[in-house]
Amino acid sequence: MAGTGQLPLFTYGFRTFFVAAGLSALILIPLWAIGFGFQWPLNTDWPPAAWHGHEMLFGFVCAAIAGFLLTAVPSWTGQKGFGGAPLMLMAAVWLLGRLLVGSSAVWPFVAVAVADLAFLAVLALFLAPPLLRERNRNTPLLAVLLLLWLCNAGFHLGLWRGDALLSRQTLLAGINLVLILVTVVAGRMLPPVTTAALRQQGTNQVVRPSRSLTPSAVTFMIAVAVVDLIRPNGLIAGGIALAAAIAQGLRIAQWQGYRVLRHPLVWVLHLAYVWLPIGLLLKALALLTGVAAATHWLHALTIGAIATMILGVMTRVTLGHTGHRLQALPRTPLAYGLLTAAALLRVFGTALPWISYPALIAMSAALWTAGFGLFLRIYGPLLLAPRADGKRG
């Protein structure tokens, strides 16, 4: 935890990296849409699609993961929070990676790769001591960070070799790791917060994780990740994706999200999770039948599941850790709705014959940008101000 003389932005990890995630979401997608629509060259020598995918995962998503972990680990271990100089260092390393990747055309390849790969390594070095010292049950998250780092390293190796397939596969592996993380974290978070919301409505029913569906869902997601590495785009991959979709669909149905529609901070987490079985089912349809309507399954998983979960968690954590009530601020549901509309348009918009593909990309990007812009407008002041209750953090 930070002293009173520090800037609020650098007193706790969620403040720094939720702002970073919000700003990167606000910058990266418009850049990609403008570059795609107008063939506007970016100051990078990477293939545009590779830059887009990499920065959304290792820039935007990893910033959000860092904000979550740098806030959760002190709570899990009872240790002092990360703030001040260590947090500034981590933020500087993250920002340096983004700047060098975005201007890779003017830097040596090794310099760009080292700057980009440094962030997850530095993050793990800060998180490891308290987790290992307390022998916390969440210590395996360090392995997740290591695997993400290896995916990023494989991506850079693919660029260096000119092996586009390696870069694509390692990028997909990184996305699958995040989906496994979503599966595990949501399984711990959604039942208790749903139960709490039901109690606020006067219902004493307890929502519990299923002892059979939880391991099944996690196992199938791991299987999806493995088969995508060794034999992607085949019937086996399609069959495993279908099994994972069924397990995830049964799991989210058990959590009864339809009963908490009066609680935006809760239903948005259910909404994000619903995109998991949808995305996996679309993937299975695309691989098993080749139906064109399922072509954009990846964006159902990235915009729908991952980005919506990030937005939902960031709003909830921001309120709780800045001393405010866990009640969505005005216009928060609108931000959720804009992002959901962006996902729906990106995934299913090609079925609308009167919208050209570049226009579809532009419209989806505009909705995404409006959603995250609204998040920064509503929750940015909370992230940049001292806690409302006068406590540290």
Image: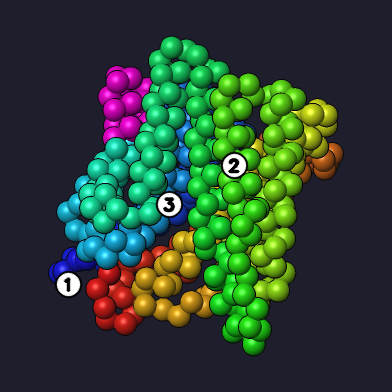
| Front tag of 2 and 3 | 2
**387 over 104 or under it: above or below:** below
Which numbered circle lies on residue 64?
A: 3
**244 over 77 or under it: above or below:** above
- From mark 2 to mark 1, how far is it between C-alphas? 46 Å
> Image point 44% across, 30% down: which residue?
151
Query: What residue sits right under mark 1 in the picture?
Result: 4
Disc 2 element: helix
Q: Amino acid at mark 2?
A: Thr
Quadrant for residue 150, please give it. top left
Query: What residue sits right under mark 2 in the picture?
Result: 219
- Residue 200: percent from left, percent from top: 59, 84
Q: Are marks 2 and 3 in contact (CB under 8 Å)?
A: no
- Residue 165: percent from left, percent from top: 55, 18
Q: Upstream in the sequence, badge 2 or badge 1? A: 1
* Farthest residue, direction bottom: 202
Q: Which is nearer the eye, 101 or 254? A: 254
* Farthest residue, direction front: 211
- Residue 86: percent from left, percent from top: 20, 52
* Farthest residue, direction top: 161
- From mark 1 to mark 3, how far is it between C-alphas? 25 Å
> Image point 39% across, 46% down: which residue?
141
Q: Amino acid at mark 1?
A: Thr
The magenta span reads 99-118
Taking the image as shown, residue 357 lies to the left or right of residue 366, namely right
Taking the image as shown, residue 144 lies to the left or right of residue 226, namely left
> Image point 66% across, 74% down: which residue?
260
Q: Which is nearer the eye, 223 or 363? A: 223
